[in-house]
Image: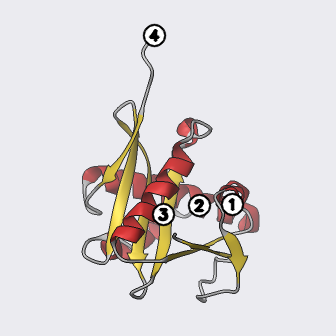
Amino acid sequence: MRFMRWTVAPEPYDSPVAAALWRAYYTEVSDRWYLLHEGRRTDPGELEREIAAQPGSDLAPPRGRLLVARYGGEPAGTAGVRLLDAATAELKRVFLHASMRGRGGAPLLVRAAEGAARALGATRMILDTRSDLVEARTLYARLGYTETEPYNDDPYADHWFSRELA
């Protein structure tokens, strides 16, 4: 029996792998929001505009990193970090394909992102998320993140978390 293994490594934000994972991530979180609030999926034109408007260049060196998790060598998910100031990094685009969830990849990705943030000089990680992303909120709490006051005015965010990076 062959055991599948997780690997996590930096990936250029504009690589085909990163682009495909960004599209999958954005499609899922956007569809979840629209289905919950408007009873419909994301309009394809809107999806394309938003993907084009947020290419991920803020997750590129020297002030950011995009990480890709692979399971058995196949791209399975992402996590990104970007420095907001010399001590604070923001966790972005944490995502695993639905078929890969429950296999330990999400904590591995977040811990790898914390390591990347430390390598960039950060001593604290912050993030925002939504109420309907229950799995994400559960993961962050399990990994030692605590809810904090809002640090941004993102209209889709309604939960903010922070964790000191020892």
Q: Amino acid at mark 4?
A: Met
Quadrant of the rendering where the N terminus is positioned? top left
Residue depicted at x 70% and y 72%? 146
Query: For the residue labelled by badge 2, is the local secondary structure a helix, a strand or a loop?
Result: helix
Left or right, 57 with reference to 46: left
Which residue was labeled with disc 3?
93
**Mark 1 or mark 2, earlier in chain:** 2
For the residues labelled 1 and 2, the Cα–Cα distance comes to 8 Å
- The CA distance from mark 2 to mark 3 is 10 Å
Tag 4 residue: 1
Labels 4 and 1 touching (C-beta < 8 A):
no
The numbered mark, 2 or 3, whose residue comes first in the sequence reads: 2
Residue at 60 percent across and 88 percent down: it is 151
Taking 17 as reference, is 130 above or below it?
A: below
Quote the CA–CA distance across marks 4 and 1.
Answer: 35 Å
Q: Which mark is residue 123?
A: none
**Which residue in the structure is indicated by mark 2?**
29
Pointer 4: residues within 10 angstroms few (<14), some, or many (20+)? few
Looking at the rendered image, the disc whose residue lies closer to the viewer, 2 or 3, is 3
Q: Is residue 129 left or right of residue 122?
A: right
What residue lies at 72% left-to-right and 57% top-to-bottom? 138
- Residue 121: tell me if it is visible: yes
- Residue hosting label 1: 133
Under mark 2, the amino acid is Val
